[in-house]
């Protein structure tokens, strides 16, 4: 069977350091970006995608970029 593509995500959520943000995911959107100022250190992080039934899925890929 071919791999399935989940396309009913409605929200994205990010928690890292003292940053907690969420964003609406539009139909067909390929990525979600968050920008925040985080000082150097070790932090726990959660990156989630929430579907139309309010089920939480872990983000598949997370990229962190220093600006």
Image (cartoon, rainbow, N blue to C red):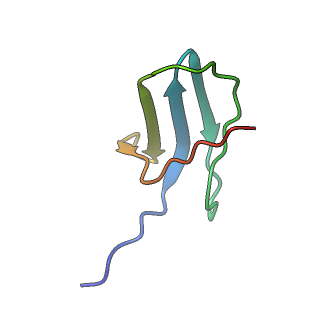
How many numbered marks have been drawn onto this rendered protein structure?
Answer: 0
For the C terminus, give its image quadrant: top right
Outermost residue to the bottom: 1
Q: Residue at x 59, y 32 (%)?
A: 22
- Farthest residue, direction right: 67
Q: Residue at x 47, y 53 (%)?
A: 61
Residue placed farthest to the left in the image?
1
The relative height of residue 3 versus residue 50 in the rendered view (above or below) is below
Percent position (x, y) of residue 17?
Answer: 53, 19
Which quarter shows the N terminus?
bottom left
Q: Going 70% across and 23% down the picture, which residue do you hit?
A: 37
Please tell me in which quadrant of the rendered image residue 12 appears: top right
**Residue at horizontal 65 percent and vertical 54 percent from the top:** 26
Q: Percent x, y for residue 54?
A: 41, 39
Left or right: residue 10 compared with residue 55 = right
- Of residue 43 and residue 21, the one placed in the foreground of this image is 43
Position of residue 41 in the picture relative to residue 46 (left or right): right
Q: Quadrant of residue 19?
A: top right
Relative to 49, 58 lies left or right: left
Q: Position of residue 3 (x, y in %)?
A: 32, 76
């Amino acid at each position: 069977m071919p791999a399935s593509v989940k396309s009913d995500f409605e929200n994205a959520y990010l928690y890292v350091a003292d940053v907690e943000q969420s964003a609406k995911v539009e139909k067909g959107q390929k990525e979600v970006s968050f920008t925040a100022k985080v000082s150097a250190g070790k932090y726990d992080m959660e990156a989630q995608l929430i579907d139309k039934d309010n089920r939480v899925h872990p983000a598949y890929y997370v990229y962190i970029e220093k600006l």
